[in-house]
Amino acid sequence: MYRNILIVSDNFFLINAFQSLVEGINGIDVSYTCSKSNIALLENKLLKVKIEPIELKKNYLEVIKKYDLVFSLHCKQLFPNELVHSVKCINVHPGLNPYNRGWFPQVFSILNVMKAGATIHEIDEQLDHGAIIAQKEIIIEKWDTSLTAYNKIQAAEIELLKENLPSILEGNYKSNHAKEEGNVNLKKDFNALCVIDLEKQVTMNEAIDYLRAMTHGHYKNAYFIDKETEKKVFVSIDLKPESENY
């Protein structure tokens, strides 16, 4: 069994959920860390665990010496090659590999109509690429936004962890590589999506899909520039399916 475990995460929900899953498991020591820039998480008093900042690029040698298993739970840092070659590293990824590997998979699944879901996989040198341990597909409805799709995915991730964490900790899980390489979306690809081209001609279906892909709660994503004031004007959409009682 892996005994010294490091969690690297920038996601409040997944940290608390993971802590609940490992609570009461004897013989393991779990430490929780997040990106140094994630001040909101570091100061969040609703976390069930003590969390420390970490910079993997600078501190990977310390991680190698101290831990024998590292979990990435929506971590915004890339794992150094030296780390993934020295320690077993597992990623809980909010996408159904190999579709839309990389940043914000649910956004691109809405736009390119590729499968969405959650994947637990080993980490290798490539982005969201290692051998797949477990997956769960979710269905994105026509009224889902980036946020509601993401919430479905997080729930699927917790289910996968419940089902597979014991075998991962014991080191006796089975894994398989994806049959194809799939596609990758980077942060710059998402940033490019945020700028609305007011002259672009699209169908209403394409416009609605774009806006719901870019709508994520209070986040200001999609915008256009007002020519008179030169200010950004942020745009989102509110979708509600007809209820049975309507």
Image (spheres, rainbow, N blue to C red):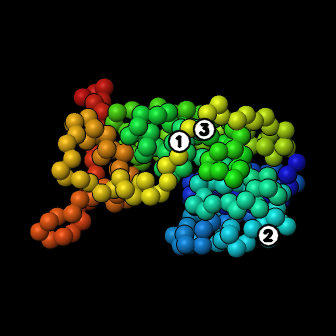
| Residue 183 vertical position relative to residue 16 in the rendered view, above or below | above
In the rendering, at what x and y percent does residue 173 appear?
A: 80, 37
Q: Quadrant of the C terminus?
A: top left
Residue at 85% x, 43% y: name it. 170
Residue under circle 1?
183
Q: 150 and 159: which one is in front?
A: 150
Reading the chain from its start, which is encountered first: label 3 or label 2? Answer: 2
Say what amino acid the circle numbered 3 marks. Answer: Glu
Residue under the point 47% across and 57% down: 187
Task: From the top left corner, tell me how far across and down residue 98 is, in percent.
Answer: 58, 38
Pointers 3 and 2 in contact (C-beta within 8 Å): no
Instruction: State the residue position of label 3.
Output: 181
- Residue 193 is tagged as none
In the rendered view, tell whether residue 39 sits above or below residue 244: below
Whole-angstrom CA distance, mark 3 to mark 1, is 7 Å
**Residue picked out by circle 2:** 61
**Kind of residue at disc 2:** Leu
Instruction: Give the spatial CA distance, label 1 vs label 2.
Output: 31 Å
- Relative vertical location of residue 232 with respect to residue 162 in this rendering, above or below: below
Residue 162, image x, y percentages: 69, 40
Q: Nearer the viewer, mark 1 or mark 2?
A: 1
Circle count: 3
Residue 25 horizontal side relative to residue 81, left or right: right
**Lower sequence index among marks 1 and 2:** 2
Q: Residues within 10 Å of mark 1 (few under 14, many from 20)?
A: few
Q: Which amino acid type is shown beneath numbered disc 1?
A: Asn
| Residue 19 appearing in the image | no
| Residue under the point 79% across and 71% down | 62
Mark 2 packing: few (<14 Cα in 10 Å), some, or many (20+)?
some
Q: Are marks 3 and 1 in contact (CB under 8 Å)?
A: yes
Dot 2 lies on which element?
A: helix
